[in-house]
Image (cartoon, rainbow, N blue to C red):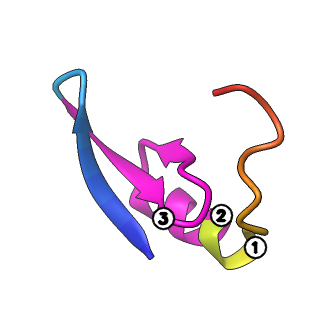
Amino acid sequence: MVVDTERDGATWFECEDCGLLFDDRSEAEEHERHCDAEGPSYIQ
């Protein structure tokens, strides 16, 4: 599930499985469909 979170005065969309943040809800939802829940493979 994608959750809204407030950081630095902006709304971000977070993948609940791995914690990766997106500035666009549709990108976050697309990521979540393919997320392996092991965390991002790169530093944010």
Q: Is residue 27 magenta?
A: yes
Q: Is residue 9 magenta?
A: no
- State the residue position of label 1: 34
State which quarter of the image contains the N terminus.
Answer: bottom left
Location of residue 33 in the rendering, given as x and y in whole percent from the top left corner:
67, 78
- Secondary structure beneath disc 1? helix
Location of residue 12 in the rendering, given as x and y in whole percent from the top left corner:
34, 44
Image: magenta residue range = 10-31
Height in image: 5 above or below 3?
above
Q: Residue at x 79, y 32 (%)?
A: 42
Q: Name which residue type carries label 1.
A: His
Q: CA distance from mark 2 to mark 1?
A: 5 Å
- State the residue position of label 2: 31
Specify whether 20 is left or right of 12. Answer: right
Tag 3–tag 1 contact (CB < 8 Å): no
Q: Name which residue type carries label 3.
A: Glu
Q: CA distance from mark 3 to mark 1?
A: 13 Å
Q: Quick one: label 2, few (<14), some, or many (20+) residues within 10 Å?
A: some
Query: Along the polypeptide, which appears first: circle 3 or circle 2?
Result: 3
Specify whether 22 is left or right of 10. Answer: right
Frontmost residue, 29 versus 43: 43
